[in-house]
Structures are given as C-alpha cells and as structure tokens.
Amino acid sequence: MKEVIKNLSEFRNRPLAKPSKRIAPLLLSILWLCAIAWVGFLWNLGNIGLVDETEPLFAEAARQMTVTGDWITPYFNGETRFDKPPLIYWLMAVAYRTLGVNEWAVRLPSALCAIGLTCLGFYTLWKEEGRRKKEEGRRKEEEGHDPDSDTDTRMNVTVFPPSLSHSPTPPLSPSPSIPIFLSTPWIGAALIALNPQTIAWGRTGVSDMLLVGCMCSALLAFFLGYTLEEQREKAEISTVAASRFPNKWYLTFYVLIALAILAKGPVGIVVPALIVGSFGLYLGNFRQLWREMRPVSGILIILAIALPWYIFVILANGQTYIDSFFGYHNFQRFTGVVNKHSAPWYFYFFVVLVGFAPWSIYLPVAIARTRFWQRSYWRRQPRSAQLSLFALFWFGCIFGFFTIAVTKLPSYVLPLIPAAAILVTLLWSDIIAGNEPENRRAKLEKKPNSLPLGLLVTYIFNVVFLLIIAGATFYSYNWLGDDPAMPNFPQAIQQSGLLIVGGTIWITTAVAIALLLWKRQQRWILVANLIGLVAFIIFGLTPAYKVVDINRQLPLRQLAQVAVQQKLPGEEFIMVGFWKPSLVYYTQGPVTYYRAVQKAIDYIKESKNPNSPSILVLGYPEKFVQLGLQPNQYQLLDSRGAYQLARVPRQAFR
C-alpha cells in the first residue's frame, strides 16, 4: 500500500503536458480510424446488389424474420435454414427496421464488426506502445535523460512516439523521433483493416465477419485482461469483488465468446479455448490463468447469453435441427468434405499469402523475430511484453485447426488475419525504430548501412511479389471467362481500363519500394505498400466491383423486377439450370429451382395449379431449347445479360 501511495504521489507531482499536446494525437487517431473505416468498409457499401450465391441467403432469411415475426427459426424460400445461428439474422433484421430493406442494411453488421475489431486492435497496440515508452523512459532515467521531454505522460501518445523492440533482445540504439502515422497503433489499425480478406468479408452480408469481430475481439479482450491482472498484482489490489469475479476484460471476453457462439456455433468457443489454453501451457501459468479467469462464472455468463436460443430452436425443430446444424454443418465439415469444398493441405498457405497481401510477405520474418523457441525467456517476461507471442499462438492455432479440417474455404482462416497484422505491426515497429537483435549489433557497428539478410530478402521479395500481382492484373482478363452468368465480363473489364490502372499502381509501388531500399529508407517501405494498396482499392478494386455487378447481378435484379410486375395471381416462378438466391430476395416471393432440366419437366407435368394455367420460367436461352420449347410456345417477357424470362403455358409440357 505504501508503494501504491508513493506512485500516486509521484504521478500527481509530475508536470502535465499542454492540453493541445494531449488532444492533438487523440483527434488525429480518431480521424485515422474514421479514414480506415470509410475506405475499407463504408465507402460504396450498398452501391452494388447482393452477390449470389451466399449473401442473398442471409439477407432473405433475415427479411423473413421481420415478415413472419419468428425470431427463432430462420427460413429461406419457404424452407428452414439451419446453416448458421441467428445473430447475423437478428442484426440484419434490426438494420432493416432502421434503414429499410436494402443492401446497406444487409452489409452494415459486417462492416461495423470489422470497424469495431480495428478500433479494439488500435487500443491494444496503443497500450503496447505505452508499455514500450515506459521502458524507454526508465532507460532514459538510468542514462540521466528526462523521460518527459518527448512524451505525453497523461495519454502515452505523442506526435513523435518512440518504439522499442518486442523481440527478446535489447535495441541497438535509442529510438529516433517517429511521426505519429508510423506509430505502432496507427500501423496496426491499417494492417488489421486494409487487406484483401478483411475488406472482402467486411463488405459482405454473411456471418463470417461477425464471427471474426466477436471471436478476435474476445481474444484481444483476453490479452487486455491478462495484462490487467499483472497490473493489479503490482499495485497489490486484492478485494473480495476481485477474488469472486473476473476483471472487466475477462468479462468482456466471456460476453464476446457467447456472441461468437450465436454467430457461428461451437467454433466460437472451441478455437479461442485452444488458443488461450496452449498459450497458458507454453508459459507454464495455465493454473494461474484458470484461477484468475474464474471459468465457472465465465461459463455461466456464456450459457446465459448463448444457450436460450439453442434450447428454443431445438424445441421448435427437434432432431432435424440437431442433425443439420451440429451434425452436418459442424462435425461433418471438420471430418469430411461438404459441398465439394476440398483442398490440399497447403491450401491455406496460398490463402494467407494472397488474402493478407502485401503484408503477408513479412510474416515469416515477423514470426521468426518472436524467438518462440526461447521458452525460458518468455516465461521470465512480464505479461504486458507477451503480445507478439500471444499473436503467434493465435495465428498458429487457427492455421493448424483449419488445415486439419477436411472441408476448406478461404474464409475459414479469416480469424487469423488480425493476429498476422499484430505480428507484422510489431516487426515494422522495430524496423522503423531501428531495433535489431543483439547478435547483429557488432556487425552493424562495422557496417552501419547493412541490412539483416532475412529482411533484405523480404524487401526484395516484396518488390517481386508486387510485380507478379501487376502482371496477373494486366492479363487476368484471360482467366475470367468461366462464369456463364457473365460471359461478356472479360471484354467489359478490359474495355474499362481498370486492369491497366490496377497493374500500373502495383508497378509504381514496386518501383518506389525498390528506390527506397536502394536509398536505405526502410521505414518508408511500409508507407509505400499502404499507399499502393489504398490507391488500388480506390481506383481499381471498387470500380471493378461495379463492373462485376453490372455484368453478373444487375440483369437478375432487372428480371426480378419484371417478374414482380408481370406475375399473375397464383403463377409459379421457376428457375431452370442454375440457383440464384438473389431472385428470392428481390422478388420477395417463393422461387422453385431445378438444376436438371428433366426434373424441371417432370415437376411441371406432375404439378397441378387450376388457378394459373401458366408459369414463369427464368433460364439461359439454351435451357429453353433443352426444355423442348419452341419460340412460338412461350411469351418472352424480357431478356437481360445471359438470362431470359418467359411465360410458358403448362400445356406446352403435356
């Protein structure tokens, strides 16, 4: 207690920074987060239609909840939909009530989850930078310097914050003044948000980003609670309340885990438990973690939030729900191939390489710099210095878990992207601050302009990788002709000039990085990559979304509108040869689907509807020929893109 009083007295007597120096970094940081959120997730969010085949399934199931008032059992096209738990449907339904039934409302929950995760990542890395600055202050005090000369003691944020190495070795020399846009939290927020995987799923109205937002925020909350316990121990805080209940961040962890379970099921608790458990076992403090996390209280919190819906949905649907959700969509996806989504064991290496580009180039070096094999070192370190190690376990457990799983999809490893971003952020913090491992110090004293071999190879590969992306962008129109839904897309994208723009952006970025490397300006390589990526998003990727929408989805929306206008009372709507759920969403009515033409013919012949002597048929022109229909046997209502919509008398099939 005396030590606590002494520390409080010292803090009260320390000179305060000017208000402008405290407020300016905060305002700049808020503007930075807003800019990232706008470019990455909000800009043009609802300007294109829903993308078949998955997104409309979620959107229509949520709309059905608002229509039927059944918030327990999800439905799509008149059938139960047990693929996912209800949280994403609930959030979309709330957005419908607020914003109306539109694409913005469908995608807003995913965008907000991505933004929330980015902000919590920023906060976590801000705390990490505060820890580093305290260490820098202690070192300066030992050397006789004033630790407050360039530091805001009230916020641990400065316009020119220094950075310290997160590796097990001391820095080579004191860190120079660093602009705020190169500070650890600013870099981390950009890397968490601005990568292909996060941008794609943060703009898509499905449950993947909701799971990532809940589960990854829970893991960040765990680490913040983990370090908070250390601070309590140092401050000698021990109260009855603290002994009975988890701290505020552990409580947040449990709440977010419960929401993750409502977002996508058991994976929302299995994967975080694997990460936290392996992390604790490695450090040898698993028992201590168990005691301080109060798992009994945590389990009760999780059950109180997540369990009621599962009870209600099982009561409403019985064994059918258990077999479908727990059996098929969870257990079977892990042990067998579902929906032909199989891939080789090395599949996720390519997914991470492309999905986290261009930052994935630096992952091997970032992982190596954690020195994870030095277990005795890590066990001696304070908890607050173990962020890079925790991110490594986070990354490795998810990568290993889904590599073992038999069914493989790119979105499965989306939850490891924030961990990868943290690892690369801490690497770049060291690069920008000029920190190097101790075994490099003597060499660098002799060769001050030399670079570590690992980093030099990575920088060179960064240039080569961007040139490969540029080449792939230039010639990608040759590989884009396989989708029968948009046969003219290769010509459209080539005529738009977007491939030339995108390829030029990546070539320019590669040349800029090569020049910076030649000039030994390594810290600005990160900025060049970021500028190139943002330019590609604004001038290449976003306009390309519009071209895809015009060629692939717009014709279906237009035909859906025609179907709504032309449909007679009791007339049935049938799709033949393909499955486009967006028709159900945009017509807001049932649509019968048959992939096999003969099954469609048999169904029409056997079905009897005295109220409607005709049916609406949507398909490719060749499907009408395969149905045995002559042009004079049906009324062509409209033709858009690769599709045509017609009214066909039932007698034509007799």
Image (spheres, rainbow, N blue to C red):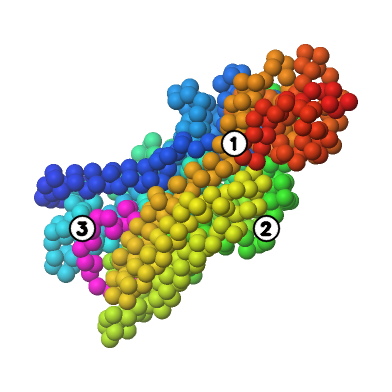
Indicate the position of residue 253 as horizontal and vertical percent values. 46, 42
Question: Circle 3 sits in a helix, a strand or a loop, which is it?
Answer: loop
Magenta region, mostly helix, strand or loop?
loop
What is the magenta range?
A: 169-187
Q: Amino acid at mark 3?
A: Phe
Indicate the position of residue 557 as horizontal and vertical percent values. 58, 32
- Give the Cα distance between marks 3 and 2: 47 Å
**Magenta-drawn stretch contains 314:** no
- Tell us which disc is closer to us: 3 or 2: 2
Q: Nearer the viewer, residue 400 or 588?
A: 588
Residue 454 in sight from this viewpoint: no
Q: What label does residue 343 carry, if any? A: 2
Q: Residues within 10 Å of mark 3 (few under 14, many from 20)?
A: some
- Give the Cα distance between marks 2 and 1: 32 Å
The part of the image, by quadrant, that contains residue 145 is bottom left
Q: Amino acid at mark 1?
A: Pro
Relative side of 445 to 215, left or right:
left
Furthest residue toward bottom: 446
* Residue at numbered disc 3: 160
Q: Are marks 3 and 2 in contact (CB under 8 Å)?
A: no
Q: What label does residue 555 carry, if any? A: 1
Q: Residue at x 67, y 43 (%)?
A: 330
In the rendered view, would you say 509 is above or below 544? below
Quadrant of image for the C terminus: top right
Q: Amino acid at mark 2?
A: Ala
Q: Residues within 10 Å of mark 2 (few under 14, many from 20)?
A: some
